[in-house]
Amino acid sequence: MLYSLFLSFYVYFICSSFTLTSAIPSRQRKDIKFLTSDEKEQYVNAVHLLKLEPSPFHEDMSFYDSLVLLHQEAVKYEQTELPDYNIAHGTSVFPPFHRKLLSLYEDKLNEITGRNDIAIPFWDWTDPESTEALLADDFMGRGDPEQCYKVTTGRFNEASGWTVDVKSYNEEHMCPWTYLARGTGDVSATILEVIMATKQDLDPLMAVSRYDCEPWDDMASLNCSFRNMLEGYDPQDHIKQRMHNAAHWWVGGKFYCEDDKSQGTVGTLDISPADPLFFSLHAFVDFLWAAWQRRHNHMGEYFPTGTEGHRGPAGLNLDDELYPYLNYKDNLEMMKRGITPRDMLFVYNLDYTYSTLERRVDFDSL
Ligand SMILES: [Cu+2]
């Protein structure tokens, strides 16, 4: 009985995934709160190794720091050779840009450890239990309010050798430390309203039937832009930060350190991946995209498509190459799984899935 149930799920999955060629990927991303201590240990050790692995993209840099730099390059695109090209945040390519970044990260974690089952554990930022597991001593750890939220516990504190090596390009950056900082909820130094999503808030998100709509940025109506709602902008009120944006603000924090305004690593947009917590935060963003695709049978839906009548600005269309990945076209590792939004549409093509998707749990009952 169980077996036939499994088989029917499996057949369903084959039929519903247009480009599926093999069995369920060996990498199953799951909620941090369900990780065994062995799995946590493996993951943490692999991430530390990535910080030592040389980068194939940038000279004299570790693979890990190279990912931070790619993110930074996307954020400071204005100063680049493609000034009219569109970027990774506040636009249609927000989900595929980050799916690519996570894929580079996860592929390499497996490669350097000789494994094929290391998957990014996701932080369900609507669930206090998941948050507890995230910040626990055997995982990410916490910031100390007495030391301007310096991360002193967990597996990435200063004592464990973790360092922040990419500096923010923002002159007045407020995260100057070589160690991680996490304000976790202290946003007393910002006028922004940080509204952490609850499980109930995911229902209206999942109900939006269209991926994105004009003007393809943070002003896109939440009635027609799943992407903008997921990212966390409110076109009616820019003070309000929700969903993904709120998760960044909440973990990073914005607080007073002595008398200066400061912020944590994950709250500093350009270098936010310098905190490994970033990848778990974004794995949940990615999960929500995958769940939404499944929910609407919109596996391949993406806007703007770039076709007549649905053309968006350069850099945002389905077959446009994502910035800044397009600058690394001569690198095989970068190009292996493609660099356009179209290449990023199916998680199976990237060799991973989410355990909750496999069980076909309906989103309402998660
Ligand atoms: Cu980002």
Image (cartoon, rainbow, N blue to C red):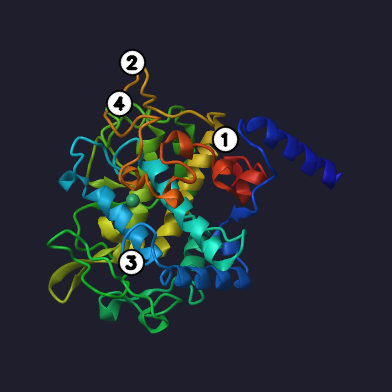
Hey, what amino acid is under mark 3? Answer: Met
Q: Which mark is residue 61?
A: 3
Hey, what amino acid is under mark 4? Answer: Gly
Using residue 95 as the reference point, say whether residue 76 is left or right of it. Answer: left
Real-space CA distance between mark 4 and mark 1, rounded to the nearest whole angstrom: 25 Å
Assess whether mark 1 and mark 2 are in contact (beta carbons under 8 angstroms): no
Determine whether 250 is above or below 101 in the image: below
Determine whether 89 is above or below 280 in the image: above
Mark nearer the N terminus (1 vs 3): 3
How packed mark 2 is, by other alpha carbons closer than 10 Å (few <14, some 14-19, many 20 or more), is few
Hey, what amino acid is under mark 2? Answer: Gly
Q: Secondary structure at mark 2?
A: loop
The x, y position of residue 237, in whole percent, is 23, 39
Hey, what amino acid is under mark 1? Answer: Arg
Nearer-the-camera pick, 163 or 343:
343
Q: Circle 4 is placed at which residue position?
A: 312
Q: What residue lies at 60% left-to-right and 68% top-to-bottom?
A: 39
Real-space CA distance between mark 1 and mark 3, rounded to the nearest whole angstrom: 38 Å
Q: Secondary structure at mark 3?
A: loop
The x, y position of residue 122, in whole percent, is 51, 57
How packed mark 3 is, by other alpha carbons closer than 10 Å (few <14, some 14-19, many 20 or more), is some
Q: Which mark is residue 146?
A: none
How packed mark 1 is, by other alpha carbons closer than 10 Å (few <14, some 14-19, many 20 or more), is some
Q: Secondary structure at mark 1?
A: helix
Tell whether circle 1 marks a residue whose Cβ is less than 8 angstroms from ligand 1: no
The x, y position of residue 344, in whole percent, is 47, 39
Viewer-side label of 3, 4:
3
Mark nearer the N terminus (2 vs 1): 1
